[in-house]
Amino acid sequence: MPGSGLILAIESSCDETAAAVVQRGSRTLSSVVASQITTHARYGGVVPELASREHLRAIVPVVRAALLQADVTLGDLDAIAVTSGPGLAGALLVGITYAKALAYAQNIPLIAVNHLEGHIHAVLLNERAARAANSAELDEEPALALVVSGGHTHLYLARPADGAWHYTLIGRTVDDAAGEAYDKVAKLLGLGYPGGPWIDALAQHGNPRAVPFAFSQIKTKLHLGGKPPRTKAAKTAPIAALDPHFLFSFSGIKTAVLRYVDLHNLRPEAESRREALFTGPDAPANPNVEAALATCDPQTLDLIASFQHAVVGDLLKKTFAAQESLGVARILVTGGVAANRELRARFTSEGTRRNLHVAFPTLALSTDNAAMIGAAAWPRLQSREFAPATLSADPSLALGSQHNGH
Ligand code: KG4
Ligand code: ZN
């Protein structure tokens, strides 16, 4: 029945077609995700044209499944929410067009959500659900949010005020996203796509201190002459005004791994690993850790463990430095890379050491999904902040305002 706070959310910004029904931003009635991993895995990355085509195929059955699992009909909904950016233009358009048509047909409002805001609300959704279950107060505190995925490595200050959330960009990557580095290193080593889960699993078997990878302080002005960087990860916001202490760069470590591989002649091993792991036309969707382990000598495992240790260490150092400088008591870590076990363990113990609250989404809500979009849309429904009928995809949509670090 309309009026019960039910939002149908649709997410199609990258390589996952997702739909969810979320009630009042806190209760997930269904969350369906159709992954295109097997389509893109053979190319070692997302192919935009294939992504749009797969979204077109999946969108109707995925939305239908989300309604069915939630046991609601279109007539029960109060609004339709959809990701309007950032992401792949063609992929975003599939979700937007379908969401618009549904909202128009049902005569209910359409709510546009920024994908990055969605990732932040993946954590808030869990927290609200837990509080609602304890019937505790629903007051929400400001937080520093690290959104770390295949497309982004961004630090935001997130503040609740007047029933809405406000975001200030604090830091970001100047080149590759952390997840992109995971994917590229995995590809180089003959592992599957996406690379994160493979590296996560194999890193447990190596020595994280074997290869001393280092991150140097980023000098934005020298590095980029104040111009916005020209990578997929860096399009969503300018960097010139940010404090360089909160900037990330992951293209250097990718090159360092490449050099290490060449220096130690590990390419033939990577090639035979690729052959051993990929026998059919499609790569396995889940890491076959046993099979991969059988192809890795200790040197490769040490390299993988050291790469991960360095990446997590850099994310940790800059996030806690930003937290200290802002004086917030809460850190949210979200996005695909937040599924990483070493990252969760080290952020949690550093939080405990500093007496700070560090929160993550559940594993299912760490990677792309629509429940987080439905959660982010709830405050907008309450403040009646609706999307215009002319809503279109914005591939480089930025989130919030920018913090001047100088
Ligand atoms: O949030 P997400 O599903 O999509 C984007 O918005 O990019 O994140 C996908 C990224 C990929 O780069 C993938 O390798 C990484 O998240 N990832 C992980 C893990 N699981 C997924 N990285 C490290 N450890 C993991 N366990
Ligand atoms: Zn994402």
Image (cartoon, rainbow, N blue to C red):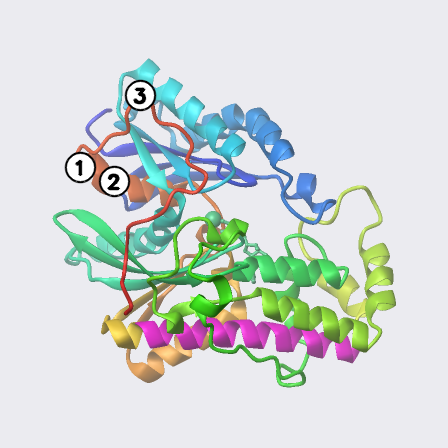
Identity of the residue drawn at 59% across and 64% down: 251
Marks 2/3: CA–CA distance:
19 Å
In the image, the residue with mark 2 has its CB under 8 Å from the nearest atom of ligand 2: no
Q: Earlier in the sequence, mark 2 or mark 3?
A: 2
Task: Residue lying at the far top in this picture: please name it.
Answer: 105
Mark 2, residue position: 378
155 horizontally vs 385: left or right:
right
Task: Residue lying at the far left in this picture: please name it.
Answer: 162
Mark 1, residue position: 382
Mark 3, residue position: 389
Relative height, residue 174 to residue 343 (above, below): above
Q: Quadrant of residue 320?
A: bottom left
Q: Quadrant of residue 115?
A: top left
User: Which residues, given as a range, are shown in magenta?
Assistant: 297-322
Q: Earlier in the sequence, mark 3 or mark 1?
A: 1
On the image, the x and y values in percent for residue 386 come to 24, 30
Let me know if residue 177 is in the magenta part: no
Q: Is residue 204 visible?
A: no
On the image, the x and y values in percent for residue 176 come to 55, 59
Marks 1/2: CA–CA distance:
6 Å
Q: In the drawing, what numbered circle is on residue 227?
A: none
Q: Nearer the viewer, residue 65 or 100?
A: 100
Q: Secondary structure at mark 2?
A: helix
State which quarter of the image contains the C terminus: bottom left
State which quarter of the image contains the N terminus: top left
On the image, the x and y values in percent for residue 308 come to 59, 72
Q: Nearer the viewer, residue 254 or 305?
A: 254
How crowded is the residue under tag 2: few (<14 C-alpha within 10 Å), some, or many (20+)?
A: many
Marks 3/1: CA–CA distance:
19 Å
Q: Secondary structure at mark 3?
A: loop
How crowded is the residue under tag 3: few (<14 C-alpha within 10 Å), some, or many (20+)?
A: few
Label 1 with label 2: CB-CB less than 8 Å: yes
